[in-house]
Amino acid sequence: MKLLYGWPKYLKKNPFHYCPGCGHSIIHRQIAELLEEMNLAHKTISIAPAGCAVLAYNYWDFDCVEAPHGRGAAVATGIKRCLPDRLVISYQGDGDLAAIGTAETIHAANRGERVTVIFINNANYGMTGGQMAPTTILDQYTTTTPEGRNARMHGFPVHISDLVAMLPGVAYIERVAISSPKGIRSAKKAIKNAFETQINDEGFSLIEVLSPCPTNWKKTPADSWKWINDVLVDEFPPGVLVDRRRRKDKKRSGKKGKKNAD
Ligand SMILES: Cc1ncc(C[n+]2csc(CCOP(=O)(O)OP(=O)(O)O)c2C)c(N)n1
Ligand code: SF4
Ligand SMILES: [Mg+2]
């Protein structure tokens, strides 16, 4: 009999602590599946964030270290520079990456660090009780925007992936929405592209995942998918934001051009 679906080899048999309908568990599973399918688990070092995914190492059966809040891209840089043959994955939420970790993320991307960031954007600080994050959209209710996010008072949603995509060190950025079976399949393909980008030494890669947080959104899991599809994707449209893979230009690779070589 052909096995169509089973427990991924690199996912521990610990029950997830995530709320029903939370997107973190879907992406945890996809990362474990891909490392098995791509035969990369033995050389992977992942980085868990502060946020709801703080215990990611309880689920992943491959190496994982914990980074202080927001410092994932800096920790990833250090690991990758010491161990360049490893696949280094920094897993971060939107509060973690787009607020306290803005500087680390932008500078790691600008340096073209050969690391992959998985950016879980659920438009709020999930773990600490649903406060406004930089990615919270206008009019969205959170515990710190009880009347909805107001641009005059709180500023506009930060499109951090679009900002980072402008930097020449970046090789691949894609945004996906895990709010439909199609979107979930696209997420796995996007994460695979990012891992390949790193394995091929092409530059910084980041996948932004629009991910449901039913508990803090105060919605059912089904309504959370609907809200992503009806509302959140208007602010953060899914798609490839930049793809500079397989570029041949010498400035990028750091190799001297003919003109400068002699
Ligand atoms: C230096 C520091 N400041 C603040 C915190 C508190 N804190 C823990 S998680 C978190 C926000 C998490 O939000 P996000 O990164 O979006 O992850 P989510 O829980 O939504 O997945 C904050 C502010 C901390 N742990 N460390
Ligand atoms: S609070 Fe939100 S992000 Fe955190 S586990 Fe629950 S649904 Fe997931
Ligand atoms: Mg969040």
Image (cartoon, grey):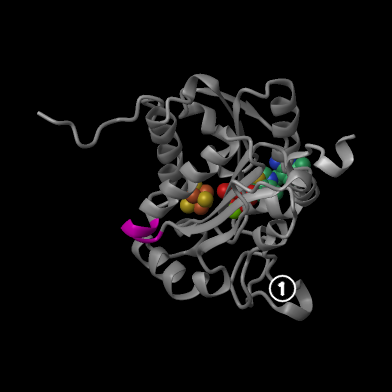
The quadrant holding residue 130 is bottom right
Q: Position of residue 21 (x, y in %)?
A: 39, 53
Q: Which residue in the structure is indicated by mark 1?
A: 156
- Count of numbered marks: 1
What segment carries the magenta color?
179-183
Specify the quadrant that holds the C terminus.
top right
From this viewpoint, is residue 127 visible?
no
Q: Is residue 75 left or right of residue 137?
A: right
Residue for point 50% across, 70% down: 233
Residue 181 part of the magenta segment: yes
- Is the residue 69 above or below the residue 217 in the image? above
Name the foreground residue: 105 vs 24.
105
Please say whether residue 47 is visible from this viewpoint: yes
| Horizontal and vertical percent position of residue 192 | 47, 42
3 within the magenta span: no
- Say which quarter of the image contains residue 124: bottom right
Q: Main secondary structure of the magenta part?
A: helix
Q: Residue at 63% of width from left, 66% of height from top?
A: 136
Of 202 and 260, nearer the camera is 260
Q: Nearer the viewer, residue 239 or 244?
A: 244
Amino acid on which the number 1 mark rests in the picture: Phe
Residue 224: x and y, percent? 42, 64
Counting from the top left corner in percent of width and height, residue 244 is at 63, 52
In the displayed structure, would residue 54 be above or below residue 58?
below
Q: Quadrant of the N terminus?
A: top left
Q: Nearer the viewer, residue 175 or 15?
A: 175
